[in-house]
Image (spheres, grey):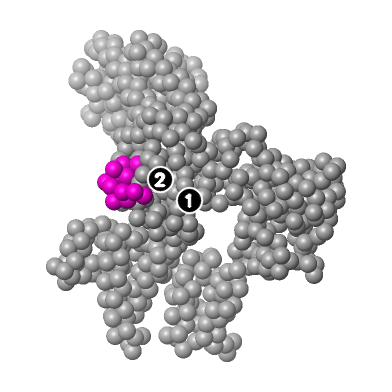
């Protein structure tokens, strides 16, 4: 690798600069988009350092202060973000280290095999194995192959990658289609065929209607069954029971897009009233595909009327609208640097992914939840308007998902502020206080329709990306009620601890903990209740210790009286912990230093704990260790220890007989 040292040094220096500037500008290494470019740059630099320059793990992050010192006069943001840049690179470098070691070792083995078989090309399947099984990036495999004067089959790798994607895609589609092996989706050749047949993209402008009685009338312009035919899977007719995708010239269905799940419902077709039970709605090149099973035969050209399941749609709408408000809340409460990284809007919940290095604190979660609920209670109108993209982009504070393609003109969703008013004064600072986003989804008309908002989970999904899951309306109200019920139970436990039987309280606290962990309630409330319950459990432990201490003190009083003037003594104790044996032995030694003592503790768990204590000047006659073993051995127990003190256990037996035998055994010796 000596000839590569200069190349490696230059590449590392270049990559350290690039990463420092990119992270300072807000970019983060990830598995997609610009983030993946950064991750590849970092891994390439780390590989050069460890393999070519024999650098230690973690060397790359140590270069960042040098970059900052060199360029911070001209770029002061480097200095202000230095700590953050180093932390991010350290985490990435640490995560890549083990993978790199395994990848390099595997590649070295592969080179030997290739030499033995007289091959000079790393196959696509070999590179894909390193990527799929070991997580080793193909660009590094290609670079290592080039350095070893070997060829790399990138086309073969891409084919393997596409095959895996196809398997995953088919699996997802089949699950959505209820397990059927038929996957209905249009690719370029099918949309091209439709275009050449003079079939126009679907008019879905009525999909934004909020009226429960809204329908869209039109015609069936194409029937798709996915078969391999000269017409690319399109048929002129279909029969009862067929699983097909219908393209209509007009629809009120919302096709899955932008994280929002597709509409479900029915399409009524033809004079005989055939029904397509729609289980999925997808859009390809503007053609909306209504997917489902037919109740009767139909043909292309038949009249159609769409009936969206608006009950379900009306559960989706508030969830989608509240993702926008949640986005605004996170920027207000957590950081203005929070950026959306994805979302899911379904009928039963909403999910929002956003950039943030650490988990949100309990108070941040509570403030975020409160912020959204304040927007709901303020009954803000929700405005939507389609405007030229350049005009929309000029609105101060408008949000868009990074990497997402937006049409021109674009649809703008605004909460509390009319879009046209904003366009008249796009630079106004007031607009930054509202939620304004580009969005093609369906929404409520007024935030009050969401009724209630509850965050039920906040968790990590990737490095630097967090996920909030939340619910609205009835689901949120149920969470509130469940939370109040648990809070009431915990409050009662807080009142009763110390006044009720401690064992009962311990059982109650354990049950409460299980119920709390399994509950679906407000995440900040759950964290607070968990802390309060831990306080109850801690107090129970303290009371148990105090109770045990009281019992032990009573036992010690008995011992002080029983050992007076005796050379050998044996006693039984109940209701104290096994570790009380040491205290008892110490008390015997202080009260009567000449006394040999044998004790049996009957614990609350039903066990028999035995211990023996022998003064130093009597160990020669019979040590505590030998005494204990001899006594317990007769009753099926076992134990051991030092000459002066030993402990053990015995199975259930006649304790009086055991103590009598212990007395006789030692009395004979002393």
Q: Which residue is mark 2?
A: 419
Q: State which quarter of the image contains the N terminus.
A: bottom left
Which numbered disc covers residue 139? none
Residue 433 is a magenta residue: yes
454 up-or-down from 600: above or below: below
Q: Residues within 10 Å of mark 1 (few under 14, many from 20)?
A: some
Q: Residues within 10 Å of mark 2 (few under 14, many from 20)?
A: many
Q: Which badge, 2 or 1, is on the more N-terminal residue?
A: 1
Q: Position of residue 587 (x, y in %)?
A: 23, 20
Q: Which residue is mark 1?
A: 386
Q: Nearer the viewer, residue 604 or 534?
A: 534
Residue 287 is a magenta residue: no
**Which residue: 30% across, 67% down?**
19
Give left or right: position of 531 versus 211: left
- Point out the stretch of residues depicted in magenta: 423-434
**Which residue: 35% across, 41% down?**
434
């Amino acid at each position: 690798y000596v000839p590569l040292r200069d190349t490696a040094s230059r590449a590392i220096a270049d990559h350290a600069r690039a990463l420092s500037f990119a992270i300072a500008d807000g970019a983060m290494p990830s598995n997609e988009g610009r983030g993946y470019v950064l991750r590849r740059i970092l891994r390439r630099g780390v590989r050069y350092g460890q393999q070519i320059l024999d650098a230690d793990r973690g060397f790359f992050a140590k270069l960042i202060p040098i970059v900052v010192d060199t360029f911070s006069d001209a770029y002061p943001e480097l200095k202000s973000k230095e700590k953050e840049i180093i932390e991010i690179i350290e985490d990435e470098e640490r995560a890549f280290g083990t993978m790199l070691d395994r990848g390099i070792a595997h590649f070295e083995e592969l080179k030997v095999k290739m030499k033995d078989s007289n091959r000079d090309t790393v196959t696509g399947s070999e590179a894909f194995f390193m990527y799929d099984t070991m997580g080793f990036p193909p660009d590094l495999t290609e670079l290592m192959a080039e350095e070893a004067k070997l060829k790399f089959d990138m086309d073969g790798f891409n084919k393997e990658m596409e095959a895996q994607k196809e398997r995953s895609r088919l699996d997802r589609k089949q699950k959505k289609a209820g397990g059927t092996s038929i996957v209905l989706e249009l690719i370029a050749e099918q949309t091209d065929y439709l275009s050449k047949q003079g079939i126009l993209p679907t008019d879905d402008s009525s999909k934004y209607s909020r009226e429960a009685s809204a329908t869209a009338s039109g015609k069936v312009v194409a029937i798709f069954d996915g078969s391999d035919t000269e017409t690319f899977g399109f048929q002129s007719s279909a029969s009862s029971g067929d699983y097909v995708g219908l393209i209509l010239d007009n629809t009120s269905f919302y096709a899955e897009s932008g994280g929002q799940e597709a509409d479900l419902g029915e399409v009524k077709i033809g004079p005989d009233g055939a029904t397509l039970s729609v289980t999925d709605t997808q859009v390809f090149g503007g053609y909306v595909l209504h997917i489902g099973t037919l109740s009767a035969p139909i043909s292309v050209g038949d009249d159609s009327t769409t009936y969206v399941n608006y009950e379900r749609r009306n559960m989706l709408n508030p969830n989608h609208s509240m993702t926008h408000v949640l986005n605004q809340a996170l920027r207000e409460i957590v950081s203005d640097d929070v950026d959306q990284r994805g979302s899911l809007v379904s009928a039963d919940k909403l999910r929002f992914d956003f950039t943030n290095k650490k988990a949100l604190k309990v108070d941040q979660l509570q403030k975020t939840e409160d912020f959204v609920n304040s927007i709901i209670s303020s009954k803000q109108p929700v405005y939507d308007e389609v405007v030229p993209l350049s005009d929309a982009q000029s609105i101060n504070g408008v949000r868009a998902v990074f990497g997402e393609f937006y049409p021109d003109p674009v649809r703008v969703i605004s909460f509390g502020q009319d879009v046209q008013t904003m366009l008249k004064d796009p630079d106004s600072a007031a607009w930054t206080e509202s939620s304004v986003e580009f969005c093609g989804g369906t929404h409520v008309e007024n935030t009050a329709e969401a009724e209630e908002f509850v965050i039920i989970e906040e968790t990590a999904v990737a490095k630097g990306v967090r996920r909030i899951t939340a619910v609205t309306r009835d689901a949120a109200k149920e969470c509130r009620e469940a939370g109040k019920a648990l809070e009431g139970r915990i409050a009662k436990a807080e009142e009763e601890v110390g006044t009720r039987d401690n064992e009962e309280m311990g059982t109650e606290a354990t049950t409460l903990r299980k119920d709390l962990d399994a509950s679906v309630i407000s995440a900040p409330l759950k964290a607070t209740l968990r802390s309060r319950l831990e306080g109850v459990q801690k107090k129970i432990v303290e009371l148990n210790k105090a109770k045990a201490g009281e019992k032990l003190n009573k036992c010690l009083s008995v011992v002080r009286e029983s050992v007076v003037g005796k050379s050998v003594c044996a006693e039984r104790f109940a209701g104290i912990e096994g570790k009380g044996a040491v205290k008892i032995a110490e008390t015997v030694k202080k009260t009567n230093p000449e006394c040999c003592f044998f004790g049996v503790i009957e614990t609350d768990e039903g066990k028999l704990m035995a211990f023996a204590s022998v003064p130093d000047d009597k160990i020669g006659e019979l040590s505590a260790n030998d005494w204990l073993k001899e006594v317990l051995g007769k009753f099926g127990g076992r134990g051991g220890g030092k000459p002066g003190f030993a402990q053990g256990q015995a199975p259930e037996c006649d304790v009086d007989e055991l103590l009598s035998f212990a007395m006789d055994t030692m009395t004979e010796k002393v």
